[in-house]
Amino acid sequence: MQDNPPPLTDSRLHALQVAVRAIAELRPAVAKIRRADRDLGEQIRTALSSVALNAAEGNGSAGGQRTARFSTALGSTDESRSALRVAVAWGYVTGSEVAQGDALLDRVGAMLYGLGARRQ
């Protein structure tokens, strides 16, 4: 059974909550990817962490900094999803092993866009 972090109670942090759920969901797949390709596994781990951390930072920011942090989080979401596709293409994991986490990341991306993130 996975240890899940305690839920955040502030509804403004819903994107962060879903990002953390995605990390927990993808943790076994990322570990498997890292065993096959250390660099790709670390890149995914870093990108996933960036999604959550920048979403949290954006929530505590205002104006242009808020938009910039949410935009960075969105970029990291896109990077994470692309890296997972690369891992599937290399055969390190199957699509079904990352499908649930990818769906959560898709939700995070939509929420970040709604919060003002802009694709560069």
Image (tube, helix red, strand yellow):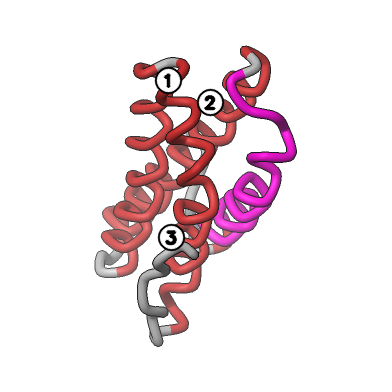
Q: Which residues are magenta?
A: 92-113
43 horizontally vs 24: left or right: left
State the image coordinates of residue 85 (x, y, percent, origin top left): 64, 25
Residue in the picture at 37% in, 37% down = 45
Which residue is labeled 3 in the image? 20
Residue in the picture at 57% in, 30% down = 84
Is disc 3 placed on a helix, strand or loop?
helix
> Which of the two labelled residues, at mark 3 and mark 2, occupies the earlier sequence position?
3
Which residue is labeled 1 in the image? 40
Q: Which amino acid is tagged 1?
A: Leu
> Which of the two labelled residues, at mark 2 and mark 1, occupies the earlier sequence position?
1
Residue in the picture at 52% in, 64% down = 18
Furthest-bottom residue in this view: 9
> Which of the two labelled residues, at mark 1 and mark 3, occupies the earlier sequence position?
3
Is disc 2 placed on a helix, strand or loop?
helix
- State yes or no: discs 2 and 1 in contact (Cβ < 8 Å): yes
Which residue is labeled 2 in the image? 83
- Pointer 3: residues within 10 angstroms few (<14), some, or many (20+)? many
